[in-house]
Image (cartoon, grey):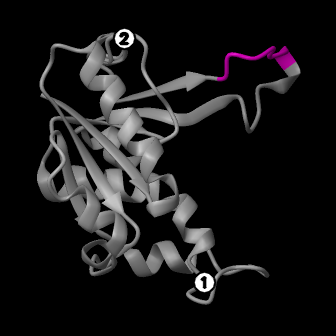
Amino acid sequence: MIHISAVSDYNYLLYGLSLRDSIEKHTNENFVIHYLAIDEKTEDFLKDIPNIKVYSIKEIKKDPMFEVLKKHNPPVEGDPEDHSAQYQYALASFFTHYLMRNKNLEHCLYIDCDIMFYADIKKVIDSVKNKDVGLIIHKHLVLDYMQGPGYYNVGIVYFSNSEKSLEC
């Protein structure tokens, strides 16, 4: 089974459904997208979609570590009234870690909802076999001096369920 995590609100729901469809079209493996719905409209829409297990943001906010996430991602000027904009960016890694701790997944591949696959997703899984964490570099021109922040694409990140992976 291939486990994938994704996060979005209703504004990105169409992208999330396209991600699901692209994986279904190009893979013969069983897969499930563990989908964190940031709002109730998204949660309601996704509840009966094949290959998607939807999680409510309300459930995730009950996790004791959620307050740590909010503390380290304080609101900035222009945030919505609920001050969620900053910590929403950090939900990808937080939610994936939540799944690994609470659902005991063998592995999990976080994928941004606006990514589509045109080949079998198993190629990604196979490329990181026996690794704790798998990162992808950006495919644009990268010079030696540019290998700082922004060198890696965090739109796709693989985690095994190992101690090293959970530390990351």
Q: Which residue is disc 1 drawn over?
A: 83
- Name the residue rendered at 40%, 68% in the picture: 38
Give me the disc on residue 70.
Answer: none
Task: Please determine whether, in this image, residue 123 is positioned above or below residue 99.
Answer: above
Mark 1 lies on a secondary structure that is loop
Q: Residue 75: x and y, percent?
A: 67, 81
Instruction: Indicate which disc residue 127 carries.
Output: 2
Q: Nearer the viewer, residue 8 or 99?
A: 8
Q: Residues within 10 Å of mark 1 (few under 14, many from 20)?
A: some
Indicate left or right for 64 with 16 as reference.
left
Rendered position, 15 above or below 153: below
Q: Which residue occupies 25% across, 24% down?
A: 24
Query: Which is the main secondary structure of the residues drawn in magenta?
Result: loop
Q: Is residue 127 left or right of residue 32?
A: right
Q: Disc 1 residue type?
A: His
Residue 134 inside the magenta-drawn segment: no
